[in-house]
Image: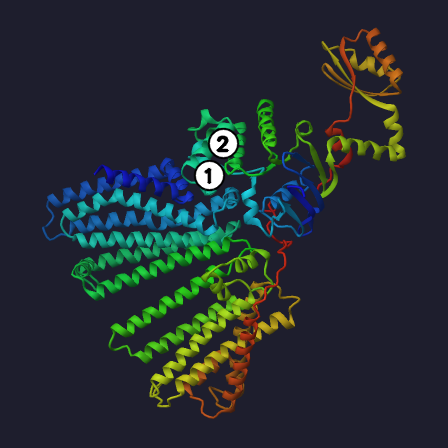
């Protein structure tokens, strides 16, 4: 039995079917990504997992306990970070964490230790006396993560925690999550930054219009996608003959677009300054010929590499961008 | 001394460590809030300016019998009362609105704190603010005493009354805050209600103080002296006020906390316990009145108790007999996991229709016992001048029969005839209320149209719970066939509820979301 299980989950709001027959599971020490366009039902699923909502049918189990029937027990096992949350004015970082430690019935030395450990883990020590309202977005996210961790839960449910963070803050936040997973916590995270999820997650679930499109290990999803595409006649040719190549120039070259357009094997080209994304039809030999021709044309390239499907490609291929 | 200080320090640490988290948070926030500090300073400055003006007036040309101190006190009390009553009450309402609007409520709700604890913490925080304001204004009130025209007892009692009233209105504000969800209109209405209510209370208190000083009616100074001299009546008044205040605060917190509980949780035990507690509390006061008042006879006390019990049973029954008969697993666990005395109590106070029926019939049985006792002890007891010894008993039985019949009819309509449409407790309550109102008015109207005013032979009057009961009160029933039919139906209905109440086997079903339930994107 996995630590977190979602079983045939349905949730409707009138005519809107926010979640439909959703099932997936993940275990302790795992970081599980949750991907879907806006309005796909990610937050609804997370709220049900966090015991803040109940399903129309189906169930969510955490450590074998239903989030509906054993809400009080489950609440002690989870830390939930919503996508939007209000912060308290006129309160410092330390007081904020202390308030939640008190709310989780930590008393005396245990509370003090929990507060300082949390502040220390989230690297908020230097800001502990600062009012929350003066914190940057990144620091606020860390503080909110700290709030989730103060009672040492086994499962973390994080609804788009990196939204609005700068790259450095995002990397630092990601590192914190990796440490938490190494400590044995199950992390359930939704995000729009798919490259980040690809690097962070062991497994993902992709949903659209409340329905599960695919779930499992990222590699296996990619493989499935390829097999699925191969099964379709119209995509078979495309997959066999078209390859995406990423070209990087060491300096901008005005002739880039014209030069690429002249090459017969290039079916599609996208130029963005010194980065070029080229779709080339043919096999490895054709790619070699393209490289030779570009060098002969005087293109100042220093990198020419075939690109594999990343999570973003998978997401775009699997979903249709529909919202309800 | 050193040891004593260590003990005090330890106690202080323990108190701060175990204080309600909401109290700690709100006080920390408020002490830094510009609004609080601004209001505090404004009050201090205004009080200082007014005190200086009045002190000058006292020393100037004003006559010696001019009650300068009283004028200053009334103005200070009015300003301070406005902050402690309407301001604090609406502040407590705003805190809950804000908390629920900003989604911070969800974060607190995820902690092991129950809604009742959260509300209690908020109430404590509001009261602490009130105390801080009181500390600020108290020296100026003392100054009003030092000027001429008001006695110290009046000042102290006024302060106590104002603080108690402030806390009571804050509790009402919190209860009102729990009633509203997100609709702006309902929030506006509730704010207006709380503000209006607390302003009215403030005006009443101020007029009481003014009248007391002018020598009309109740005098606060004399009352304080009576208290200090150990006068029983004065202490009794204090006890009654304290009792009402505690009951009000408890009711606000329990009902507020219950409203905020999820419907899958046990929402029955708290209110049911509270209701029974309030009923017993009222019965105790009736007995005290019988003991201390020689003009209040024991049989009158029993009659009052019986009336209280039937009203209490009707109110409790309206909620407890309309509950769902199938429990959620969480509700079921609140019964099965109870131990010791709690296990016994859960037979009557546990959630669900069956236990609700048992609680309802238990109260009805208590009512019946009091009526029978009244009849046995005072077989010569009279009602409306009649000497018929069994009149009280008969009237009591008839009253109970009406309650049982109408509740049973509503139950059968909701659960047997229209069970496919009437699926929630709210609808069942609406059916019960609707049935009583419709039958009461419809049958009365039919009675008037057919037979005229209180025609004994017109059975329509007897079908209506309104005119039927009043008919029996005015015209004692002797050997009427109607009373036989009524008793038979009443006993059958009572037996119906007892049978339902004795089926204590728990049936559970998972609580699932309804389509219309809270869409976070839809708010």
Q: Looking at the picture, do discs 1 and 2 lie on one chain? A: yes
Q: Position of residue A93 (x, y in %)?
A: 45, 31
Query: Is B474 placed above or below B230 here?
Result: below
Q: Position of residue A91 (x, y in %)?
A: 43, 34
Instruction: Tell me if residue B521 can be seen.
Output: no
A103 or B479: nearer the viewer: A103
Q: Position of residue B456 (x, y in %)?
A: 48, 90
Local secondary structure at mark 1: helix
Pointer 2: what residue?
A: A118
Q: Chain of mark 2?
A: A
Query: Which residue shows up at 69% across the image and 28% down it?
Result: A198
Pointer 1: what residue?
A: A101
Q: Quadrant of the N terminus of chain B?
A: top left
Q: Position of residue B275 (x, y in %)?
A: 43, 64
Q: Residues within 10 Å of mark 2 (few under 14, many from 20)?
A: many
Query: Which residue shows up at 62% across the image and 56% down it?
Result: B511
Evaluate if marks 1 and 2 touch, with contact meaning CB atoms under 8 Å apart: yes
Mark before the other along the chain sequence, 1 or 2: 1
Q: Residues within 10 Å of mark 1 (few under 14, many from 20)?
A: many
Q: Quote the CA–CA distance across marks 1 and 2.
A: 10 Å
A12 or A216: nearer the viewer: A216
């Amino acid at each position: 039995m996995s630590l977190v299980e979602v079983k045939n989950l349905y949730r409707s709001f009138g005519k809107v079917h926010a979640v439909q027959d959703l099932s997936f599971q993940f275990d302790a020490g795992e970081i599980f990504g949750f991907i879907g366009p806006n309005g796909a039902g990610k937050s609804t699923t997370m709220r049900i997992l966090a015991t803040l909502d109940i399903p129309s049918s189906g169930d969510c189990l955490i450590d074998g306990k239903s989030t509906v029937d054993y809400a009080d027990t489950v609440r002690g096992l989870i830390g939930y970070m919503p996508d939007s949350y209000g912060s308290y004015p006129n309160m410092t970082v330390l007081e904020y964490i202390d308030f939640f430690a008190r709310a989780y019935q930590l008393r005396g030395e245990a509370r003090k230790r929990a507060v300082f450990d949390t502040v220390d883990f989230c690297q908020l020590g230097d800001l502990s006396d600062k009012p929350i309202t003066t914190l940057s977005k990144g620091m606020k996210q860390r503080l909110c993560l700290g709030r989730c961790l103060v009672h040492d839960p086994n499962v973390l449910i994080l609804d788009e925690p990196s939204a609005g963070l700068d790259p450095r803050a995002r990397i630092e936040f990601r590192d914190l999550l990796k440490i938490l997973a190494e400590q044995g916590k199950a992390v359930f995270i939704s995000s729009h930054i798919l490259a980040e999820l690809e690097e962070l997650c062991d497994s993902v679930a992709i949903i659209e219009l409340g329905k599960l499109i695919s779930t499992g290990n990222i590699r296996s999803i990619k493989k499935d996608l390829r097999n699925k595409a191969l099964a379709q006649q119209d995509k078979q040719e495309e997959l066999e003959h078209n390859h995406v190549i990423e070209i990087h120039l060491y300096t901008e070259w005005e002739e880039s677009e014209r030069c690429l357009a002249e090459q017969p094997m290039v079916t599609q080209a996208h130029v963005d300054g010194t980065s070029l994304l080229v779709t080339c039809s043919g096999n490895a030999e054709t790619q070699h010929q393209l490289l030779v021709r570009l060098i002969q044309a005087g293109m100042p390239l220093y990198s020419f590499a075939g690109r594999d499907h990343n999570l973003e490609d998978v997401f775009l291929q699997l979903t249709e961008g529909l919202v309800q | 001394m050193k040891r004593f200080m260590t003990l005090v320090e330890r106690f202080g640490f323990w108190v701060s460590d175990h204080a309600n988290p909401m109290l700690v948070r709100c006080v920390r926030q408020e002490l830094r809030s510009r609004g609080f500090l601004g209001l505090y300073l404004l009050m201090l400055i205004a009080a200082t300016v007014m005190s200086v003006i009045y002190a000058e007036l006292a020393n100037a040309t004003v006559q010696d019998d001019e009650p300068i101190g009283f004028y200053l006190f009334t103005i200070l009390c009015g300003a301070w009362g406005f902050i402690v009553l309407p301001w604090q009450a609406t502040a407590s309402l705003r805190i809950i609105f804000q908390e629920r609007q900003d989604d911070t409520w969800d974060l607190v709700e995820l902690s092991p704190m129950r809604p009742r604890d959260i509300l209690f913490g908020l109430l404590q925080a509001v009261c602490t603010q009130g105390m801080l304001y009181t500390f600020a204004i108290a020296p100026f009130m003392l100054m009003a005493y030092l000027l001429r025209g008001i006695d110290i007892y009046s000042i102290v009692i006024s302060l106590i009354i104002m603080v108690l009233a402030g806390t009571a209105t804050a509790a009402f504000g919190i209860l009102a805050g729990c009633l509203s969800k997100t609709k702006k209109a309902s929030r506006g209405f509730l704010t207006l209600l709380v503000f209006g209510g607390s302003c009215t209370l403030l005006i009443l208190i101020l007029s009481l103080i003014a009248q007391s000083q002018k020598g009309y009616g109740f005098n606060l100074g004399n009352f304080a002296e009576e208290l200090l001299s150990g006068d029983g009546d004065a202490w009794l008044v204090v006890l009654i006020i304290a009792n009402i205040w505690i009951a009000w605060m408890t009711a606000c917190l329990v009902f507020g906390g219950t409203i905020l509980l999820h419907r899958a949780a046990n929402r029955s035990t708290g209110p049911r316990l509270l209701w029974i507690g309030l009923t017993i509390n009222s019965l105790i006061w009736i007995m005290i009145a019988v003991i201390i008042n020689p003009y209040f006879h024991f049989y009158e006390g029993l009659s009052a108790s019986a009336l209280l019990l039937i009203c209490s049973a009707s109110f409790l029954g309206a909620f407890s007999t309309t509950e769902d008969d199938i429990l959620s697993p969480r509700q079921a666990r609140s019964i099965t996991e109870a131990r010791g005395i709690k296990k016994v109590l859960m037979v009557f106070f546990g959630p669900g229709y069956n236990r609700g029926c048992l609680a309802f019939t238990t109260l009805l049985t208590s009512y019946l016992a009091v009526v029978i006792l009244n009849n046995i002890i005072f077989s010569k007891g009279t009602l409306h001048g009649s000497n018929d010894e069994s009149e009280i008993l008969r009237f009591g039985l008839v009253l109970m029969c009406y309650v049982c019949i109408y509740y049973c009819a509503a139950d059968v309509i909701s659960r047997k005839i229209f069970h496919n449409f009437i699926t929630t407790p709210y609808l069942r309550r609406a059916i019960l209320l609707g049935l009583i109102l419709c039958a009461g008015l419809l049958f009365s109207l039919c009675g008037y149209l057919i037979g005229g005013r209180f025609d004994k032979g017109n059975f329509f009057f007897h079908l209506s719970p309104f005119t039927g009961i009043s008919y029996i009160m005015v015209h004692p029933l002797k050997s009427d066939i109607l009373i036989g039919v009524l008793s038979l139906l009443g006993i059958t209905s009572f037996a119906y509820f007892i049978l339902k109440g004795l089926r204590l086997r728990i049936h559970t079903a998972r609580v699932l979301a309804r389509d219309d339930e809270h869409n976070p994107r839809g708010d």
